[in-house]
Image (cartoon, grey):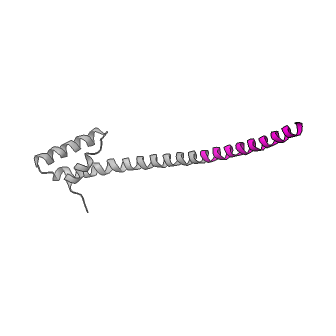
Amino acid sequence: MEADLRTLYQHAEGFHFSEAAIRALHQRVGRALEAGAQTDDLEAGYRAALRKYFASFDTQTRAQLRDVDRRLAELAQAQLNFNAERNVAVKRLENIGTMLALLDEATA
């Protein structure tokens, strides 16, 4: 099902277009829709511009998500390693405490 031009325009309103060309095209479409003007000549170009813009944005965002997921996995592994290291240190302290207590008993 293909969205109509007004639906595309309204949904695109939620985005901040950083590229001047698509921002200008978006504004032209908005003005044409408000005026009730014929939009057939704008629609194909607007759809193509939106597809190009959002396809690029999709690629960038997926790469960002992969990077964040990779860093989160590294962080989780580091946390696991720190917890294991902490547990070893706690066990060592328990054993040292036991040894010192035994030595104190022997010299008392």
Q: Is residue 100 magenta?
A: yes
Q: Is residue 65 magenta?
A: no
- Residue at 84 percent of width and 42 percent of height: 102
Taking the view exactly as shown, the residue that stands out farthest to the front is 108
Left or right of residue 95: residue 23: left
User: Which of the image's four quarters has the N terminus?
Assistant: bottom left
- Residue at 16 percent of width and 53 percent of height: 40
Nearest the viewer among 61 and 52 is: 61
Taking the view exactly as shown, the residue that stands out farthest to the right is 107
Coordinates of residue 90 in the picture (x, y in percent): 70, 43
User: Which of the image's four quarters has the C terminus?
Assistant: top right
Coordinates of residue 6 in the picture (x, y in percent): 19, 52
Residue 72 visible in the picture: yes
Coordinates of residue 41 in the picture (x, y in percent): 17, 51
Nearest the viewer among 72 and 89 is: 89
- Write down the quadrant of residue 105 in the picture: top right
Residue 45 visible in the picture: no
Left or right of residue 92: residue 39: left
- Residue at 15 percent of width and 51 percent of height: 39
- Residue at 68 percent of width and 44 percent of height: 85
- Write down the quadrant of residue 2 in the picture: bottom left
Majority secondary structure in the magenta region: helix
Coordinates of residue 30 in the picture (x, y in percent): 18, 45
Q: From which residue to which does the magenta span run?
A: 79-108
